[in-house]
Image (cartoon, rainbow, N blue to C red):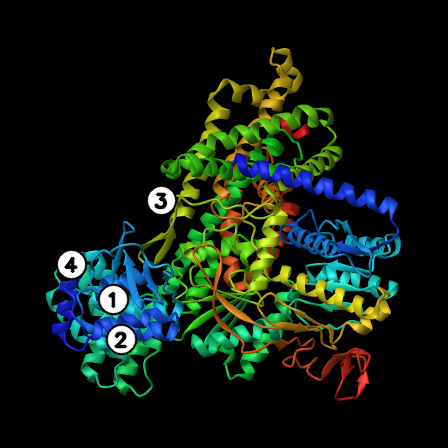
Amino acid sequence: MRFIREPLIALLCLLGLFLAGAGPAHAGPYEDALTGFTGDSYSDTAAAIDAVAASGHPLAATVIGALQERRLHFSAAAKKVFYADKAGTLHDAATGQPAAGEPPADLAMVRVNNRLRRSIDAALGSLTLMSPDAWRRYEAAQAVFKSRDEAALPALDQAIAKETDAGVKRALEQAWASIVLNQAGASAADKLTAVQLIRERGDQDAVGILSALPAEAAQPVRKAAEDAIAAIKGELALWEVAQNLWYGLSLGSVLLLAAIGLAITFGVMGVINMAHGEMVMLGAYTTFAVQEVIRTHNPALFGYSLAIAIPLAFLVAGIVGIAIERCVIRFLYGRPLETLLATWGLSLMLQQAVRSIFGPTNREVGAPSWMSGAFQIGHLNITYNRLWIIVFALLVFALLLALLRYTRLGLEMRAVTQNRPMAAAMGIRTNRIDALTFGLGSGIAGIAGVALSQIDNVSPNLGQGYIIDSFMVVVFGGVGNLWGTLLGAFSLGIANKFLEPYAGAVLGKIAILVLIILFIQKRPRGLFALKGRAVES
Amino acid sequence: MMNEIYLYVRRLLVCACVLAVFTAQSAFGADTIKVGILHSLSGTMAISETTLKDVMLMLIEDQNKKGGLLGKKLEPVVVDPASNWPLFAEKARELISKDKVSAVFGCWTSVSRKSVLPVFKELNSILFYPVQYEGEESERNVFYTGAAPNQQAIPAVDYLMKEEKVQRWVLAGTDYVYPRTTNKILEAYLKAKGVAASDIMINSTPFGHSDWQTIVAEIKKFGSAGKKTAVVSTINGDANVPFYKELGNQGVKATDIPVVAFSVGEEELAGLDTKPLLGHLAAWNYFQSIKDTSNDAFIKQWHAFTKNPKRVTNDPMEAHYIGFKMWVKAVEKVKSTDPDKVIAALPGIEAPNLTGGMSKMLPNHHITKPVFIGEVRADGQFDVVWKTPGLVPGDAWSDFLPGSKDLTGDWVKLKCGNYNTATKKCGGSG
C-alpha cells in the first residue's frame, strides 16, 4: 500500500485536518477514488481507501476517519458518498458541504472488515502523524508501528524532525525503526540503530518485530537482533512473575468476594448454605434491573449505576436471606444434612424462578467507562475492572470486620455464635440475631454479585460456578475466621495463577484441589483454627 | 423493564395455555401425529435449548395451520430432561414408548446425544439433532442437521489462512468431547497444510471458566512471534462472555488477533456488550443478517410467535427448520410415520434452507449446507464476509484423523454407519 509519495502531499493532508469541512471542491483523483466506496464490495473499498489517502485531498483524513467510526455512508443509485459528523449531520464527502435536501433513499453504511480496518488504521496513521494533538500523533505513530508501511517513511522522517514531545518522539522513532528493519534497501547502520530503538521498547511487540527480521539481513544485524530478543525475553520473564502475582491477587479478590458472605453464614453460624451462590446471582440480577431502569429513564446516571445497585443488591439478597432463614433454616439448626439438602433445593428453586422471570439467556450488564480498559505500569498490564474489584473486595472485608468488631449488632452476633444460652440469658433475642446474621451474610453475597456481574455472565447459573470455590476458601482459611477467609482466598488465587501457565487451566484447578485435600489432612481446621470454647460445640 | 416483565408474564401465560390446549387435545383425539421435543428447559443447558423448543412449537403450529400432515394434526410432546444426561435417556424412552411419538427433535450437547442413542436404537425411532458437533458418528436412527467439522471448522480455518494470512494458531476450547475432537481434527489439518507444531497452541479450559487473564496474556505472548496469529475458539457458551470481555480489556483487537468462534451466535451475543468484539469472527451455516426472502419470513414468524421483536434467530434454529421440513416431506412421500419407512425415505430428500439454497439429506444422515464467515457488528449481528461457493456435504468421519479417514457412513447402499473402505468391512477401524 502506498499512501503518500511526497512530503508536500503529506503537508496538504495535514492542512486538510484543520480545514476539514470547508475544503474546496477539486475534480480529480480524490473524487474518482470516492466512487470506490459506492460499490459495497470489500476490494473496491480497499482500493478507495488507498486512493483517497494517496490523493492528498484536504478531506482525506476526515473521510477515512468517518469510515473508521462507521459514519461513512453511500448511495449506490446516486453514486455519492456522505459522511456524518459527530453531531450526525450529513456532509457530501466530495465537497465537505452539508448535504442539501433529503438524504437519498438508498443511503447505506460503507461496510468494513478486518483487512479494511487495518488499511484504515495504517492510512489514518500516516495522515495524522503531524496532528496538533500530541495524543493523536502518538496513536498515529503506534498505527504506523503496526502497519510497517514503507510509504509512510518520508512523512515519519519529517514528523520526527519536528516533534517536541519526548514520548511521542520515541514512539515515532520506534515506528521508523520497525519500518527500517523490514525494508530491503536500508543500510546496515540504520538497521542496527533500529534494533537498538526496538530493544529499548522492550515489550512483546518488540520481540515480534525483531523475530520477523527478514532472513537476508546482514550478519551483524541478525546477531544484534538475536541478542536484543534474548535480553527482552529475560526482562519480560521477570515482569511475568509480577503479572502472575497480579492475576493471583485479582482471582483472590473474586474468591474473597464470593466467599466472604459464606464466611458469615457457614463460618460464623455453621449453616451449610448451598443457596449461597444464588444470593450472588440475585445481586447480579439486581444490577441488571437497576441498569435497565436507568437506561430507560435516566441514561445520564449510567456511570453511577453500580453505586446505586450496591445497596439495593444488599437489600434484595439480604431480605431473601432473612426469609430463607425464617421459613426454612431455623427449623433445621443442628441438623447439617437436612440443611444441606434443603438449601440445595432452595438454590434450584431460586435458579428456576429467575429463569422463568428473566429468561434463560444471559443478560447484559454494561460496564461504566471508568471500569473499562487497562493501563500499563512498566510491562505490567492492569485492567481497570480487576483493579476496582480488588479495591472493592478489600473494602467490603474491612467494613464487615468493623461491623462485627465495633457495632452492637456485631457484638450480639459474636455473643450468640460463641455461647447461645449465655447470650440468651443476657437478654439477647437470639432468634432475631440468627435471622439478621443470615441476612447479613446473604446481603454481602448480593454485593459480591454486583462486582461479579462485571466479569462474568449474568445468567441463572452464575452462582453455581462460585459455590464450590467459596466453600473451598472458607474451609481452607479456617471456619469461623474472617482473616482466614482473606488469607485463604488470596493464597488460593495466587497459587492457582502460578500453576496455570505450567499445568493449564484444567490441571491447575485439579492440582489446587489435591493440595487442599492434603492440607486439610494435616490441618483439619484450616489455616486459622478457632481455639477455645467454640471448638467443642 | 416493566414492559419486559409484562412480556415474560404474558409469554408464560401463552405457554401455559398452549400446553393446556395440547393436553386437552390429546385427551380427545387419538388421530394426531405426535412429535417429541427433547430439549432442556431447566438447568445449565436451558440457556441454549429453550429457544429450540420454542422454534419447534412454532414450526408445528405452522404445519397445523397448513392442514397438518397426512390429514392429521401434529401434536407436540414437550419434555424437560433438565440438562441431566441420564434423564435424557429416560425422557427419550418415555417419549417413544409411552407417548408413541413418530419422531423426536432434540439434544444439544454430544453427551446427551450419546446418552439417548441406545434408546433410539433399541426402540427404533428417529432423532433429529440440530447442533454442530464433532462428527465421528453416523447412526441409522439419528439425522444430523447441524454442521459436521468439515462444514464449519475446516472452512473457517481456510478463510483465516487465505484471507487473513494467518500463520500461527491458538486452538482454544472448553474441556469436553466436541472441542477436543474438533481441535484434534484441526491440528491434523493444519499440520497437513504445513503448519509447524511450534506454531500451534492448544488450550483447554474447564466448563464455565471465568478467569481468563492468564490465558489471554498467553495468547498475546504467543501472537507476538512476528507472524500473523488467530484464535480458533471452541469455547462453550457460558465461558465466552468473560473471555471476550478479557480480550477487550487487555486490548486485543480483531485487527491484531482475530478470534473465530464456532459456538458464538446471535443468541450468545445478546448478553454481551459487543463493542470490544467488533471484527471478531464466527463460522456458521446461517446468520440472522443474511438477506433472503425465506429468512425474512422466518424471522417475522419468529417475532410474531414469541411476541418479542427483539428475539434473535440462530444456526441451530435453522437446523431444526430444515430437519422438520425434511421429515414432513419424507412422511408425505411414504404416506406413513413408520420409522423404518421414514428412515429409508429421508436420504435424498431436499428442503430449502433459510439462506437461499436447497439442503439435501445424504446417505450418511448428514445434510448439505453452505458455510458463512461473519464478523461481529455493533448491534450483535454478523456481517457475512465470506461464504463457500456452494453447499458443502457433511462428512461424518473426518479425513484428517488416522482412526477415521478410511471410514464412511452410508445407510442407503452399504447399510452401515462406519464402513471401512480399506478392509471392506462394516464395523469401524478394527
Location of the N terminus of chain A (image quadrant): bottom left
Q: Quadrant of residue B25?
A: top right
Where residue A125 is drawn, which disc sits there? 1
Secondary structure at badge 2 equals loop
**Which chain's residue wears label 1?**
A
> Pointer 2: what residue?
A149
Judge depth for marks 2 and 4 and give the one in front: 4
Q: Are marks 1 and 2 in contact (CB under 8 Å)?
A: yes
Q: Which circle's residue, 1 or 2, is located before the other in the chain?
A: 1
Name the amino acid, label 1: Gly
Name the amino acid, label 4: Ala
Q: Are marks 2 and 4 in contact (CB under 8 Å)?
A: no
Left or right, B250 with reference to A414: left
How far separated are the C-alphas under marks 4 and 3? 36 Å
Q: Which circle's residue, 1 or 4, is located before the other in the chain?
A: 4
Judge depth for marks 3 and 1 and give the one in front: 1
> Pointer 4: what residue?
A22
